[in-house]
Structures are given as structure tokens and as C-alpha cells.
Amino acid sequence: MPLFMLHNDSSCQWGIWNVTETIDELLELLPHSEVYRQQMMQFASSSRRLEWIAVRVLLFELLREEKEIAYNSNGRPYLLDKSLNISISHTRGFVSVIVAKPDKEVGIDIEQYSERVRRVAYRFVREDEELSNYDEADTTYSLLLHWSAKEVVFKCLNATDVDFLQHIRILPFHVAHEGILDAEEYRTQEALKFRIHYFLHSEFVLTWYES
């Protein structure tokens, strides 16, 4: 059972699942497997089905009870019983889920480590943002954290037409193995500020926020 990482405190819970199982193996971990088997047929892609099932397995592992996930018009996930707020993310081989009480805003994002992020940096790194090295002259982790943290802010805003260049700024920070970075958004009248936690792994970066 590859529950890769688990975080649990008084305000939120999150976990990462390393998806190494088949769909059938994941279904065996859920109490009502046939219900999920029928629901996942809405997806034509087997990889999408695998990801969909893995998210539900991870949620069940976090809560030890089944919860039905739905999506609003912006594609934002929520629990049908409104018992908790939820955010979901996935990347190659991993899914992540965070939950918190309904009065808490949460967001989570996981991004595969890849130097391809350099080719698209101009799309999301502002001129007033700074990159820092994690290992010698490597800014890949810094780029990934900028992108991932902006994804978290975007998820928390639950707004349309959010431009990562114009509407979200990551304040200068030094990249460490794990830490906290600050972000600002300019999309809403509230101009919200976010303190975002992060964690680096050889295969991914993880960022998350709880209000």
C-alpha cells in the first residue's frame, strides 16, 4: 500500500499516494468497489481511470470513511456532504489530496520534477520575481515551486480568467528542502496573501495552503 506521505494536524490532513497498483488492486482497497468501477467508466482513458480511483483511495485512507467527490462549474472539487473542504492534485505516478474543516480554505499541488519547466518559464515568472538555486546552479526547483505555488493560489481563489503572470506574485525566498513561501494575488478586490508550505522530492515538488 504505497501511501507515500501523510500529514495530520489539528487544522488539516493531506497525503500523497504513489500509484504503483493496477485499477483492480486499487478497487480492492475501497469498501464499495463495484460502485467505483461503474463510475470510472465515464472516462475513456485507462490512465484517467487509474488516477480517479487513486484519489478516492487516498481520500478513504485519510478519513477512513467514504466520501463522494463532486465538481463545481469551475472544475473545483468538493465533498457532496460539505463536511470538509478538499483540494486534489496529480502528476505522473502520484496523487495528492488535502482536506480541512469547512471554514478553512485549502489548496494543494504536486508537480513532477522536470527541466521542461524552463521552456515555459516566461509564461508564469514575473519580472519582479526572483529565482534561487537549490543545488549549485540549478533553478529547476525554484521554477517548479513558482508554478506549483501559483496553482495553489489559483485553486484557492476559485475564480475565472486568472493569469499567472498578471494576477499572482511569489515573493523572494530561498529554496530549501522544505519551507514556506509567500504569495500575493491581484485578481480579486481583496488582494489576498498566502503563506504556502512546500516540500521537495527527487521526483516532484509539493505545495499546499491552509487558511
Image (tube, rainbow, N blue to C red):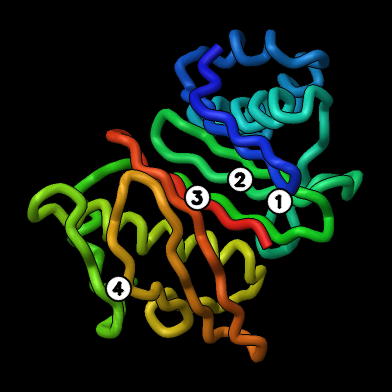
**Label 2 Cα neighbours within 10 Å, binned few <14 / some 14-19 / many ≥20:** many
**Residue 198, can we see it?**
yes
Element at badge 2?
strand
Looking at the picture, which amino acid does disc 3 mark?
Asp
Q: From what the image shows, is residue 80 above or below residue 45? A: below
- Residue nearer the viewer, 70 or 107: 107
Q: Residue at x 59, y 9 (%)?
A: 25
Marked residue nearer the N-terminal end (1 or 4): 1
**Residue 41, can we see it?**
no
Marks 1, 3: nearer the viewer: 3
Q: From what the image shows, is residue 140 above or below residue 18? A: below
Looking at the picture, which amino acid does disc 2 mark?
Ile
Looking at the picture, which amino acid does disc 4 mark?
Val
Q: Mark 3 points at which residue?
A: 109
Calculate the distance from the C-alpha at mark 2 to the C-alpha at mark 1.
7 Å
Position of residue 120 measured from the top left corner of the image (x, y, whole percent): 24, 64
Q: Which residue is drawn at 33% across and 67% down?
A: 173
Q: Mark 4 points at which residue?
A: 125
Element at badge 1?
strand
- Per the rendering, the mark at residue 137 is none
State the quadrant of the C terminus.
bottom right
Marked residue nearer the N-terminal end (3 or 4): 3
